[in-house]
Image (tube, helix red, strand yellow):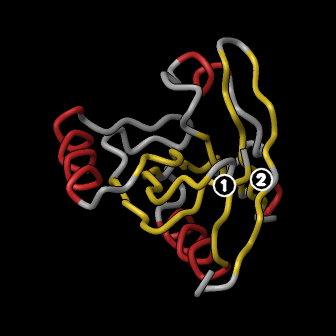
Amino acid sequence: MKFNITKEQLREIVEFTHQELPCEACGILSGEISGENLIVKRIWKFKNELNSSSRFYVSKEKVDIVISNINKLNDHLIAIFHSHPTALAIPSYQDIKYHLDPKVLMVIVSFAKNKTDIKCYQITENEYLECEILTVNQDS
């Protein structure tokens, strides 16, 4: 799988997750699937209902509303993103345990050691595989 996202979209995700510090932030990325290319078109931001710096939670009702909107737009669910305010951009045990769909990627934004790091993973059962983030031009 090739994860395609614009620099502007990455910047928006980083700004949103940074604004939510010291809490974890989370959201969904939707868009198109073309062969092996997953192309982000939209960013859906959530409020972390736990207000926690080490976990995130969004109610099923709020997620269902976004999924319904994604379906109405004929988009695909590409990835779930969240931040690690103090941990590295590596999936935690909880991240892996609660990730339900291996076709949906996981994007983690880390602010550990006052440095911003963004990584993308495919999660399968008890393993994770890093995916390359391809930054594309706005009109691609």
Q: Is residue 75 left or right of residue 2?
A: left
Q: Amino acid at mark 2?
A: Ala
Closer-to-camera residue (56/113) = 56
- Residue at point 53%, 43% (across, down): 53
Q: Is residue 8 left or right of residue 77?
A: right
Residue beneath disc 1: 37
- Tell me the quadrant of the picture where the C terminus can be found: bottom right
Closer-to-camera residue (85/89) = 89
Residue beneath disc 2: 112
Q: Quadrant of residue 135?
A: bottom right
Q: Residue 8: where, in percent of width, then height?
A: 60, 82
Q: Residue 41: where, in percent of width, then height?
A: 47, 68
Examine the rendered structure and indicate whether residue 130 appears above or below residue 76.
Answer: above
Q: Is residue 47 left or right of residue 35?
A: left
- Residue at point 50%, 20% (across, down): 98
Element on which disc 1 rests: strand
- Residue at point 21%, 39% (across, down): 64
Examine the rendered structure and indicate whether residue 109 appears above or below residue 50.
Answer: below
Q: Residue 125: where, in percent of width, then height?
A: 65, 12
Sequence-earlier tag: 1 or 2:
1
Q: Amino acid at mark 1?
A: Asn
Element on which disc 2 rests: helix
- Residue at point 54%, 49% (across, down): 81
Examine the rendered structure and indicate whether residue 57 appears above or below residue 13.
Answer: above
Cα gap from disc 1 to disc 2, whole angstroms: 29 Å
Q: Are marks 1 and 2 in contact (CB under 8 Å)?
A: no
- Judged by depth in the image, the label closer to the viewer, 1 or 2, is 1
